[in-house]
Image (spheres, rainbow, N blue to C red):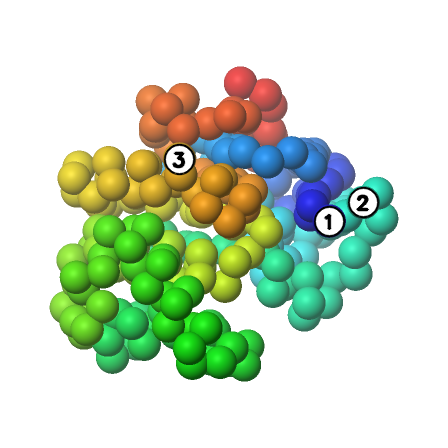
Amino acid sequence: MKLGLSVSNIWKSYNGNQALKNCSFSFNDDGIYVLTGSNGCGKSTFFRMCALIELPDSGDISYFSNGKMIQKDLELKRRITLLLPKIGVFNTTVFKNIAYGLTIRGIKRAESEEKINKVLEFVHMSHKKNQNALTLSSGETQRLGIARALVIEPEILFLDEPTASIDQKNTEIIEDIILRMKNYHKATVIMTTHDMQQARRLADYLMVMNNGLISAA
């Protein structure tokens, strides 16, 4: 069943500085949700809460399917993926970097190869499969990160500033990838950007964060 998310009245502060203030958000529809706002407004903090990497000081973050709440366990964490602006890569080929997530899930080699080749084609990196990942450009590394996230077929994919510090050519490629994602694995995409023009190009649903508060655009 489709995985949905409900965020209710979450607050978060660091060293007395309020990062999130009574934030609420929910969805259970397919599509691309874009949260925009200036740098430092709390977008990344909000994402870490939603991806269950950090806990809020108060409020509730719940995942549900078919009207029923889902326990926040390892199985749930395998159904959601957060991609950060800076991608860590292993000192090996692009292919083996993408294979890692499938290997730890026990996916057989033949099935893994099929999935990896498919996702490499999707992000326009089939010709890079045998290249050492450490030699990729920043834009190519970001596309590798997207491929690594997509190959494990998450139901919800969080993208935190996916084109930050990326050149224009790769930004355009990544935007095209994002637009095609919702049909690729039927994944729901939730992303942040400080670029309002980019947000309007990509969003099915657009939200704005300002001083730790979320509102509909």
Residue 105: give x, y in percent of width and height. 55, 77
Instruction: Give the structural element (helix, strand or loop) at label 2.
Output: loop
Residue at the image point whose x is 52% and y is 58% from the top: 153
Q: In the drawing, does residue 135 fall left or right of residue 86?
A: left
| Foreground residue among 196 and 158 | 158
Residue 144: give x, y in percent of width and height. 30, 60
Tally of marks:
3
- In the rendered structure, find residue 179 and report the number of the disc placed on it: 3
Q: Does the CB distance between marks 2 and 1 fall below 8 Å?
A: yes
**Position of 196 relative to 124 (above/below):** above
Q: Give the distance between the C-alpha atoms of the residues marked 2 and 3, in whole angstroms.
A: 26 Å
Q: Residues within 10 Å of mark 3 (few under 14, many from 20)?
A: some
Q: Give the distance between the C-alpha atoms of the residues marked 2 and 1, in whole angstroms.
A: 6 Å
Residue 10: give x, y in percent of width and height. 71, 42
- Residue 131 visible in the displayed image: yes
- Earlier along the polypeptide chain: callout 3 or callout 1? 1
Q: Which residue is mark 2?
A: 66
Q: Residues within 10 Å of mark 1 (few under 14, many from 20)?
A: few
Instruction: Give the structural element (helix, strand or loop) at label 3.
Output: helix
- Earlier along the polypeptide chain: callout 2 or callout 3? 2
- In the rendered structure, find residue 122 and report the number of the disc placed on it: none
